[in-house]
Amino acid sequence: MKKRNKIFILIMILIVLLFPFDMGGYNDGGTSYFYAIFYSLTFWHKLDDNYKSGYYEATEFKIFPFNWFKHINYVRELLTSYEK
């Protein structure tokens, strides 16, 4: 394979690994999250009476491998709360 083709393939793989995918959002007031292999980006906008506006608003950025831990724990919490 030519050097040019190898570089092109490497660039394409990096684009796929670094491009964030919209994973939808939580049903908590408008939180949306984006995941790529190497990082995650979450825009928190959830209902919370402890704030004047009535919403908790924040942005969270995590780098691999820490980007997967919170997502897994949050899903586990949701599943256990629905089972009760």
Image (cartoon, rainbow, N blue to C red):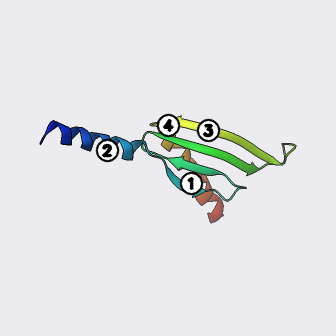
Question: Label 3 to label 4, Cα distance in Å?
Answer: 12 Å
Badge 4 element: helix
Question: Label 4 to label 2, Cα distance in Å?
Answer: 21 Å
In this figure, which residue is indicated by the disc labeled 4?
66
Mark earlier in primary sequence (1, 3): 3
Q: Amino acid at mark 1?
A: Val
Question: Label 3 to label 2, Cα distance in Å?
Answer: 25 Å
Mark earlier in primary sequence (4, 2): 2
Mark earlier in primary sequence (3, 4): 3
| Label 4–label 2 contact, CB within 8 A | no
Question: Label 2 to label 1, Cα distance in Å?
Answer: 29 Å
Q: Amino acid at mark 4?
A: Phe
Label at residue 60: 3
Question: Label 4 to label 1, Cα distance in Å?
Answer: 15 Å
Badge 2 element: helix
In this figure, which residue is indicated by the disc labeled 1?
75
Mark earlier in primary sequence (3, 2): 2
State the residue at coordinates (69%, 40%).
58
Q: Amino acid at mark 2?
A: Ile
- Where in the figure is residue 4, as x and y percent of width and height? 19, 38
- Where in the figure is residue 11, as x and y percent of width and height? 31, 40
- Where in the figure is residue 33, as x and y percent of width and height? 58, 49
From the viewer's side, name the closer residue of 77 and 63: 63
Quadrant in which the C terminus is drawn: bottom right
The mark lying in front, picked from 2 and 1, is 2
From the viewer's side, name the closer residue of 77 and 44: 44
Badge 1 element: helix
For the residue carrying disc 4, how many other residues have a C-alpha within 10 Å: few (<14), some (14-19), or many (20+)?
Answer: few
